Structure formats: structure tokens, C-alpha cells
Image (cartoon, grey):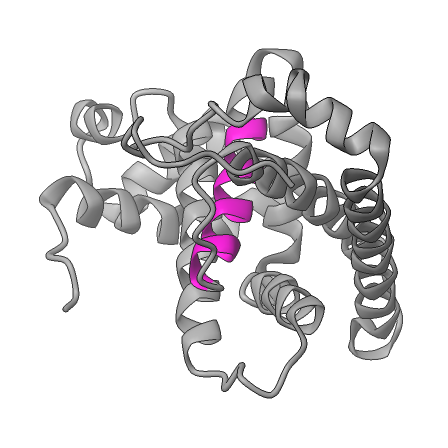
């Protein structure tokens, strides 16, 4: 069932739509924010109420919109015939294709969120995308793996975005090959990690640091669930 859209979300969406044509010229800036409010017919005070940090909030709303579009597109794809690495690659591809028509807005957003004062918001946005992908793919981890999966995918997705922004190959084919290589690197690391965990060293780690790590829980996970380390 579709969640109802609040008045705040509706107003923010109107601001975002009005802002996008300006972002290519003025970036995610105060100039863009004021122009968007004026063109959307939203009073400055009300615009500030729904986006207190101005264009930064609109940039984050734009990022969240891309995550939502990716989830919807992924839900329309049959995944059962794909290997897991192919499902992850598909999710990243759909996420980038969701904003393909607004590539300059993504570029300007990457610049904005790379500024030191916005580093926390930028990292949170990448994490949210990684979480959206893992959740859409049915990830059920509830221990340390919940964090490591999202941290690893955040790095892969962040690198993929930067590559995609500079990619001029037909249909962004070079980007999709880059994504496949990065995911392949991660899968090889996971294979090595699995072998280490089965080794005498891995068993020793399980009796020490691994036992502590197994107590780490994903957000909202009951503390009495059995831990897993792997």
C-alpha cells in the first residue's frame, strides 16, 4: 500500500521540481533555493519551514527520490534467475539510471556533499542507498554483517557514481563494466574471508574478537537473537 504523502513532503517535492532546472547553472545553492520557492509559489518562510537547510535539504530529497525510484524499478525485475552479484549490479545500474536525466544535478550534489561541513550528510546518503539496495534484495542479516555489507556497498556505489559522472561511453557501458569489476573484487574478498574463518586462525578469532563482534546488532534487532560471525 502506498504511504500517504504529507503536506511537508508535497511542498518539498514542489520545491525540488522547481529547483532542478536551476541546479545546472547555480548548483544546490541559496540562489537556486530562492528561485525554486518563487517559481513554485511558496512563501519564503514556508519554504524554509519544509527545508530548513535550504538547498542542502533539497539535494538530500533528490537523492532520496533516486533511492525510491530504484526500489520501484527493482521490484519490476524478475531476480530469481540472476546470481546474487548480478542482482547487486542491477540495483546499482537502476539507481544510476533513475537520475540519468539529471546527471548535472548529481554532479552538483556530489560536490555539495563532499564539502567538510556536509560530510556527515553525504555519508548518510550513501549509506541510505546501500541500505535501500540490501533491503530490496532481501538481506536478513542482524549482526555485524548488517553493517559491513552496507559499508562495503556504500564504497562501491560511491566509486560507481564518480566513474559514471565522467563516463561518456555509449549507454554508459564503461560504467556497468566498472561496477561488475568492483563487485567482483568484493566477492573475491568475501571468498577469502570465508576461507580464513574456516582456518585455525579464524576459529581462534571466533573465540576472541569474533565473540565480541557477534554481539553487535543491526538497528531495531532484539538483543536476544543468536549472533553470527562470518
Figure check: 147 above or below 136 = above
In terms of secondary structure, what is the magenta stretch mainly? Answer: helix
Figure check: 73 above or below 187 = below
Q: Percent x, y for residue 139? A: 47, 55
- Snapshot quadrant of residue 60: top left
Q: Quadrant of the N terminus?
A: bottom left
| Residue 228 shown left or right of residue 195 in the figure | left
Q: Percent x, y for residue 190? A: 78, 49
Q: Nearer the viewer, residue 100 or 143?
A: 143
| Residue 221 shown left or right of residue 147 in the figure | left
- Snapshot quadrant of residue 57: top left
Q: Percent x, y for residue 127? A: 54, 37
Q: Determine the residue positioned at 20% across, 24% down.
A: 49
Q: Which residues are magenta?
A: 122-136
Figure check: 24 above or below 53 = below
- Snapshot quadrant of residue 82: bottom right
Q: Determine the residue positioned at 40% across, 37% down.
A: 58
The verdict on residue 135 being magenta is yes
- The number of callouts visible is 0
Q: Quadrant of the C terminus?
A: top right
Figure check: 46 above or below 106 = above
Q: Determine the residue positioned at 22% across, 31% down.
A: 50
| Residue 190 shown left or right of residue 116 in the figure | right
Q: Nearer the viewer, residue 206 or 158?
A: 206
Q: Percent x, y for residue 161? A: 72, 50
| Residue 86 shown left or right of residue 135 in the figure | right
Amino acid at each position: 500500500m502506498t504511504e500517504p504523502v504529507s503536506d511537508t513532503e508535497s511542498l518539498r517535492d514542489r520545491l525540488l521540481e522547481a529547483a532542478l532546472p536551476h541546479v545546472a547553472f547555480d548548483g544546490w545553492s541559496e540562489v537556486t533555493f530562492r528561485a525554486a520557492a518563487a517559481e513554485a509559489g511558496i512563501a519564503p518562510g514556508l519554504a524554509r519551514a519544509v527545508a530548513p537547510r535550504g538547498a542542502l535539504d533539497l539535494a538530500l530529497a533528490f537523492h532520496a527520490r533516486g533511492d525510491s525510484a530504484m526500489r520501484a524499478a527493482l521490484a519490476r525485475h524478475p531476480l530469481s534467475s540472476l546470481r546474487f552479484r548480478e542482482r547487486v549490479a542491477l540495483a546499482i545500474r537502476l539507481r544510476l539510471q533513475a537520475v540519468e536525466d539529471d546527471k548535472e544535478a548529481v554532479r552538483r550534489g556530489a560536490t555539495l556533499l563532499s564539502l567538510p561541513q556536509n560530510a556527515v550528510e553525504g555519508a548518510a546518503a550513501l549509506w541510505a542507498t546501500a541500505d535501500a539496495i540490501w533491503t530490496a534484495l532481501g538481506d536478513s542479516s542482524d549482526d555485524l554483517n548488517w553493517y559491513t555489507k552496507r559499508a562495503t556497498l556504500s564504497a562501491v556505489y560511491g566509486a560507481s557514481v564518480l566513474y559514471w559522472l565522467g563516463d561518456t561511453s555509449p549507454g554508459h557501458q564503461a560504467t556497468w563494466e566498472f561496477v561488475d569489476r568492483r563487485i567482483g573484487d568484493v566477492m573475491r574478498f568475501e571468498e577469502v574471508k570465508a576461507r580464513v574463518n574456516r582456518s585455525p586462525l579464524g576459529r581462534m578469532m571466533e573465540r576472541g574478537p569474533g565473540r565480541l563482534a557477534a554481539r553487535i546488532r543491526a538497528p531495531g534487532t532484539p538483543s536476544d537473537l543468536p549472533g553470527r560471525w562470518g
